Image (spheres, grey):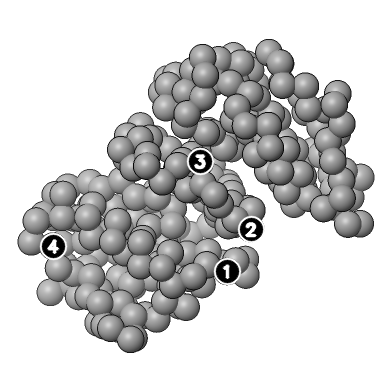
Amino acid sequence: MDWTRKTLSTEDFALKEQCIEPKPWPHYNRGMSAHIALVDDDRNILTSVSIAMQAEGYVTRIYSDGETALKALLENPADLGIFDIKMPRMDGLELLRRLREKSDMPVIFLTSKDEELDEALGLAMGADDYITKPFSQRLLIARVKAILRRATYDKAIVNGEAGSEPEPMMRGKLEMDPARHQVKWDGRSLTLTVTEFMILEALAIRPGVVRTRDQLMDAAYQDDVYVDDRTIDSHIKRLRRKFREIDPEFTAIDTLYGAGYRFADS
């Protein structure tokens, strides 16, 4: 089936004070499908993201403002939320803050290029990742899959159903706990996105070994998602900035021009 030609009907996409859950496609089992909450005041984004998520087998719930979404999600949480930051009535940051009082539902923020302060605040409040507009649907889907995998594993740990947990990793001043998505530098905690965590883990797992940009792309994005070299460079820049906020002398991530990056634990 050519899913790109499928469109939501007017009834499926009534952006009023209600949530509309489009009918699941016949080729997947609704009972086993993750529910994705999409919250954005941009009808075009809601339409395109909803169609892309349904094509991957997810059930989507759509909301045009934070107030409506908050009421619905407190009553019936989704498996993951994708929130715009700038919205009328209640923005994405306030929506996340209110949800975090009662829910640990994973959240991805959609942000504009000039919202770096909001991104940092959102991550500090408990967002799992953010993607800058305009964004690739394939990249968003890859982030959704990665976060849902981690959330499923976390629940298995809590319920005592997980197998052996990945061991915490220590590299000099760096401590990483993959099972809990926790990072510390010299005893002080950092807040990293899923993408940043995966890149750092790929570098730190073998200190001194040079990782090419392609290798870091494979570690961070998986699922055959294409990103250009500048995307990896931007994540490295953000990682360095976050470490230097707690340690101005941080130099553990080296750039080898023309080759890639490496982690030095000494």
> Three-letter amino acid code at disc 3?
Leu
Which residue in the protein does label 1 denote?
226
Q: Is residue 97 left or right of residue 60?
A: left
Residues tagged 1 and 3 counted as in contact (Cβ below 8 A) = no
Give the percent coordinates (x, y) of residue 98.
Answer: 44, 19
The numbered dot on residue 250 is: 4
The numbered dot on residue 203 is: none
Residues tagged 4 and 3 counted as in contact (Cβ below 8 A) = no
Give the mark, 2 or 4, whose residue is nearer the N terminus.
2
Q: Residue at x 57, y 69 (%)?
A: 226
Q: Nearer the viewer, residue 212 or 145?
A: 212
Location of the N terminus by quadrant is bottom right
> Three-letter amino acid code at disc 2?
Arg
SS label for mark 3? strand
Location of the C terminus by quadrant is bottom left
Give the mark, 4 or 1, whose residue is nearer the N terminus.
1
Q: Callout 1: 10 Å neighbours few (<14), some, many (20+)?
A: some
Which residue in the protein does label 2 denote?
138
Separation (CA) of disc 1 from disc 3: 19 Å
The numbered dot on residue 110 is: 3
Give the mark, 4 or 3, whose residue is nearer the N terminus.
3
Residues tagged 2 and 1 counted as in contact (Cβ below 8 A) = yes
Separation (CA) of disc 2 from disc 4: 33 Å
Residues tagged 2 and 3 counted as in contact (Cβ below 8 A) = no
Separation (CA) of disc 4 from disc 1: 30 Å
Q: Is residue 260 left or right of residue 132?
A: left
Q: Callout 4: 10 Å neighbours few (<14), some, many (20+)?
A: some
